Image: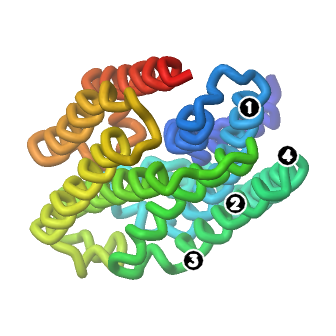
Amino acid sequence: MSSFGHKVGRTAAALVVSMRPYQWSKNLVTFAPVLFVNRFTDPLAVAKVALAFADFCILSGGVYLLNDIRDLDADRMHPRKRERPIAAGRLSAATAAWAAVALLAVGLMAAWTLDRLFFAAAAGYAVLSLAYTAGLKDAVIVDLLVVSFGFVLRVVAGAVVIHVEASSWVLICTLFLALLLSLGKRRQEMLVLEADAGLHRRNLQEYSVQFLDYLMLLVTAGALMSYLLYALASGRHRYMGITIPFVLYGILRYLYLAFQKGEGGSPAELLFRDRGLLLSTALWVASAMVALVLER
């Protein structure tokens, strides 16, 4: 292969890495509506949600590229993020910018083609994510809420693409869980960067590990209470209580890893690296399917 071919291959590989495929697992929440409205055995509905999932992977890939361009200098001071292709110099900012624009354009055009309401949700996610990258990520508390509402918009998108209502219970549970994961990530950044945290991200100097610990415990209580009420007292499902043990274990396992092992920095990576979290998630999905099949 020619040197030009090698260069193209290296650039393509760097682009893929910068799109962070390991983070695309976050987009799996688009499947929540098709599960909870009991249409997970409907091939057409599942296919539409799968396309929605793929579209969000494209959109989030473009956002990640722009985020890495914006955080270029800060990432070079981070012990892990400095290995990212743009920060490490393996991918030029100009190439990343063009690729990001192309991905966002393709993602939005695909969303428009798939469904108009889905396009509205996808466009809302893109605007929110770009606003986060542009400056909201430096606003204390707001940064956590923006990331969390990004998850909520994914769930809404998964509902509208199959023309069903997004349950307020599912949205509330999603919001609390996303807040918990966002807080765990901020807490890990504080622990890793220590005194240099404020240099990496301006708003980190406004946080403290103790404050984040308090918020994590508060949000955990909200997440658990919301799910318990949804499963047992919402009147929407008769057998969803069988899923509660797996939700309890999963959340407690995450807290154990975050507080005792200092591993809350990347929930997406942690999900596939930790057998306990992966198993509890798989058992929760399986038990939810059983509960919903019993309701038919």
Contact (CB < 8 A) between labels 2 and 1?
Answer: no
> Who comes first in sequence, dot 2 or dot 3?
2
Between tags 2 and 1, which lies in front? 1
Q: Quadrant of residue 193?
A: bottom left
Q: Measure the alpha-carbon separation of dots 3 and 4.
A: 28 Å
Q: Quick one: label 1, few (<14), some, or many (20+) residues within 10 Å?
A: some
> What residue is shown at x 70% (from left), y 29% (from top)?
46
Residue at which label 1 appears: 45
Q: Quick one: label 4, few (<14), some, or many (20+) residues within 10 Å?
A: some
Disc 2 residue type (three-letter): Ala
Contact (CB < 8 A) between labels 4 and 1?
Answer: no
> In the image, residue 269 lies at what x, y percent?
39, 36
Q: Secondary structure at mark 1?
A: helix
Between tags 3 and 4, which lies in front? 4
Q: Measure the alpha-carbon separation of dots 2 and 1.
A: 17 Å
Disc 1 residue type (three-letter): Ala
Contact (CB < 8 A) between labels 3 and 4?
Answer: no
Q: Count how many numbered circles sit on residues in the image.
A: 4
Residue at which label 4 appears: 114
Q: Measure the alpha-carbon separation of dots 3 and 1.
A: 35 Å
Q: Measure the alpha-carbon separation of dots 2 and 3.
A: 20 Å
Disc 3 residue type (three-letter): Ala
Residue at which label 3 appears: 134
Residue at which label 2 appears: 121
Q: Of 215 and 259, which appears nearest the observer?
A: 215
> What residue is shown at x 41% (from left), y 78% (from top)?
138
